[in-house]
Amino acid sequence: MNQIIEEKTFEVEVQQLVFNQRNYFKSNATRPVEFRLKQLKKLKALLLEHEDEMHEAIFNDFGKSKYENQLTEFFPLIDEINISIKNLKKWVQHKSVKTNLLNFPAKSYLVPEPLGVTLVIGAWNFPYNLSLTPLVGSMAAGNTTILKPSELPAETSKIMAKIINENFDPNYLRVVEGAIPETTALLKQRYDKIFFTGSPMVGKIVNRAAAEHLTNITLELGGKNPVIFHKDAALKTGVKRMIWSKFVNSGQLCIAPDYALVHKDVKEEFLQLAVKEIEKANFSSGNNNFVQIINHRNFDRVVGLIDSKKVYYGGTYNREDRRINPTILHNVSLDDAVMQEEIFGPLLPVIEYATIDEAFEIIKDIEKPLAAYLFSDSNAVKERFLNEIPFGSGAINDSVMQVTNPNIPFGGVGNSGMGRYHGKYSFECFSHFKGVLDKPTVIETNLKYYGYSEKQLKIIKALS
Ligand code: NAD
């Protein structure tokens, strides 16, 4: 009974929050560029002020060191704010487009406009980045925002709530903490935009809730990301780059290579180099680079994917400490458990192929991935990779690093998501571009008016 009352009370609070944010948005307070810049600068200052607490919180949540947090979360986030501050005055301008002859004389342009009240739902694996980077886009575009960070890293969720809720007007920005019941209550409300990061399964729930109100939606989801090592790849450098990107954050990275497709001629060398690189990285408790698995549920799920008969390297773990040593599985077949779901942990299954067609076929038989990577020196293979393999974003002779370039939009395709963000794409993601035809009144043509004739039609056809 008490739980029902609590849920109802929460629902009413959320309803009131959305109502207040909508009224605030309608007041036009968030539209002026100066307002947006002031708020972005304030957010940046607050993050810098609370930097140490933020590092401490994420370390307590899943053992992520200050060094790695700075590298993969904090610096990119501050960079995103800087880019928005630097470019906002340019982004908000009307964008001219050509006017066709039929409408001559006139001007045509697109007017970026904020969408209104937005809901951002974050995932846990890069909790600051995946909650606050979309928030920056929403603020830059002139919206009000309700942010629901992932509940799994509890301390990072708390610190984000503290920073935002103690310093911003709730009618403008508000962090609402919570898990499934709270998110379910949030999703009952009507928003003008929902930005969701998480699993495809929950993405469908969010999509259904958005459909109820025809709400604009961006879904940043996951999937099984392939990495191909062709026989002509620069193996030493390639494996070094790939191993870092696979095991950073203990493989809990949506764009990490999920499985490796390796040409049979270079497989043995690939495996040996991979082991060398893992050993060089020296993953062990207390190191800067050995992040814990987020919780025991995920720990047990990932460990359950290890087939001891297929372990080439690693395969060991410590449940109490929630750490799994980097593991390479070989002789993996497509029927193995590790190939049935997104791994999201430090296991690298290696599958051997004989022809590039065979490798491409394997990728095409799995849902469209969020990212794909190719290591090869052949221009023909690169061309085919780009033309034949669907993926959200990717790299050639590198992996994961595309995400650090704000000029490359970030987002999935098909089962790995819809929509894109980062840099100016974040501004676009949270804006609507009104298309406008702007005509002078001094000249008037009579082509479209009643009194239709064949001659009129011919002229219109020629001008169209
Ligand atoms: P998740 O889908 O379990 O949770 C994401 C968010 O949804 C959380 O805030 C959570 O509280 C909420 N949620 C969970 N279950 C819900 C439900 N039944 N109803 C309503 N809300 C619910 O995902 P996760 O475990 O946090 O993250 C892992 C997944 O996210 C992986 O699939 C990964 O690939 C993907 N991911 C994608 C990106 C990206 O940018 N594309 C980034 C990180 C993670």
Image (cartoon, grey):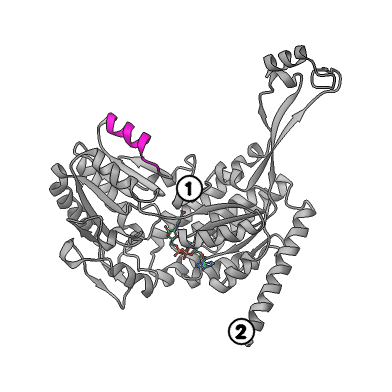
Q: Magenta stretch: give its range.
A: 379-390
Q: Nearer the viewer, residue 336 or 224?
A: 336
Quadrant for the N terminus, please: bottom right
Verify whether residue 386 appears in magenta.
Answer: yes
Which amino acid does the dot numbered 1 rest on? Gly
Question: Is 249 left, or right, of 331 in this rendering?
Answer: right
Label annotation for residue 411: 1
Q: Where is residue 165 shown, x and y percent of the image?
A: 64, 67
Circle 2 packing at 10 Å, graded few (<14), some (14-19), many (20+), is few
Q: Is residue 410 visible?
A: yes
Please identify the residue farthest to the top as the structure is shown: 455
The main secondary structure of the magenta stretch is helix
Q: Amino acid at mark 2?
A: Gln
The front one of 216 and 51 is 216
Towards the viewer: 115 or 37: 115
Residue 82 in percent (x, y) is at 56, 47
Q: Does the Cβ of the disc 1 residue fall within 8 Å of ligand 1? A: yes
Residue 179 visible in the current orientation: no
Task: Say what secondary structure mark 2 lies in.
Answer: helix
**Residue bearing mark 2:** 3
Spatial CA span between label 2 and label 1: 38 Å
**In the figure, is residue 208 to the left or right of 358?**
right
345 relative to 96, above or below: below
In contact (CB < 8 Å): disc 2 and disc 1: no
Determine the residue positioned at 39% across, 59% down: 67
Q: Quadrant of residue 291?
A: bottom left
| Residue 279 pos. (x, y %) | 20, 58
Q: Residue at x 40, y 48 (%)?
A: 368
Foreground residue among 458 and 187: 458
